Amino acid sequence: MGGKYRSLEERLRLYEEVMRLREQGLGYKRIAKTIEEKYGVSLNPGMICKWVNGRDHPLGRCNKLVKGPGLAYVVGAWLGDGTLDEDNNSYMYRIQLFCKDYDFAEEWGRCLAEALGRSRPYMPKWDDKYKRWVVKGSSILLCNLLKKGREDPWTLMPYLEKYPAEACRGFFDAEGSVNRYRIGASNTNPDIIDMFENLLEKLDINCRTHRCRQKETFISPRTGKLYRRSSRFVIHLAIYGEENILRFAERVGFTIARKQMELMKLVRKYRKS
């Protein structure tokens, strides 16, 4: 990429524009011409070819995003339990998950590595301060994607809708529960609940949603401190009925062993009857 040195953000924007133009059916030379006319940047058609075919990336080895079931699981779980830790000055773009179940943290670390094209999984570490397992990985691509998703969860749908089972399993691992008659999940963002209701429908699993007022303050299990809630309401998603529960068990399920055991108890109840 000729001319002055360009920031990570600029290179990423050019890459995304190249991929968008390629999806529209433009050839490499036409893409190069369009980029030069729009941004005043000269790109070699041969380099564009490498970008499109995945043989090279403008951010080098530090970033790669693989669309697939691993990414769908990572995003689904992150929408429940994930955070971002960014520092533009040190070029740190960290995606994090805190949870109390090691098997959940281990699976999220495996899927995060898959989503970022790594051969070795990210391993959970125990955080003494928060009394939780934590998994961390760095990627400006995924960090930017999740930042947009935090503002508008529906922007993440293209990464989830082809893999609804994995996306839902990630979300229910983070937010889900099982009792003696239903499977449920909760979130304060109605768009997130609507999106997973849509994903469950793709698996032929019907559910209901309802909104409940919650207390204005809560004590964080991580810090033990009292916080004021950002939302007055929490939205519950609930799966009832034999067919829907059996489909969930067959097509989604839980990675977390203790939740999967509760699900199997509910399944046995319906199969006996």
Image: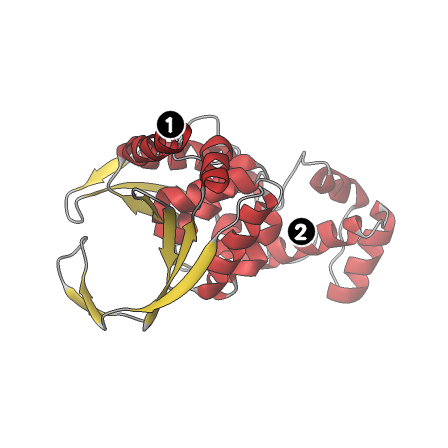
Residue ranking furthest to the left: 224
- On-image quarter of the C terminus: top left
Classify residue 157 as left or right of residue 45. Answer: left
**Image location of residue 130, percent across then percent down:** 18, 49
**Residue at screen point 48% across, 26% down:** 119
The type of residue carrying mark 1 is: Lys
Q: Nearer the viewer, residue 243 or 55?
A: 243
**Residue at screen point 72% across, 49% down:** 19
**Image location of residue 235, percent across then percent down:** 39, 63
Is residue 93 among what the camera can see?
no
Rendered image: mark on residue 15: 2
Q: Nearer the viewer, residue 144 or 171?
A: 171
**Residue at screen point 58% across, 53% down:** 157
**Residue at screen point 30% across, 35% down:** 262
Instruction: Count neighbours of disc 1 (C-alpha within 10 A) and say few if under 14, some if 14 to 19, many if 20 or more.
Output: few
Q: Secondary structure at mark 2?
A: helix
Q: CA distance from mark 2 to mark 1?
A: 56 Å
Q: Nearer the viewer, residue 227 or 177?
A: 177
Instruction: Count neighbours of disc 2 (C-alpha within 10 A) and say few if under 14, some if 14 to 19, many if 20 or more.
Output: some
- Whether 45 is drawn above or below 257: the answer is below
Residue ranking furthest to the front: 273
Q: Quadrant of residue 120?
A: top left
Q: Earlier in the sequence, mark 2 or mark 1?
A: 2
Say which residue label 1 marks: 272
The type of residue carrying mark 2 is: Tyr
* Number of marks present in the image shown: 2
**Image location of residue 217, percent across then percent down:** 20, 70
Look at discs 2 and 1 and give the one toward the viewer. Answer: 1
Q: Secondary structure at mark 1?
A: helix
Q: Are marks 2 and 1 in contact (CB under 8 Å)?
A: no
Classify residue 206 as left or right of residue 25. Answer: left
- Whether 77 is drawn above or below 106: the answer is below
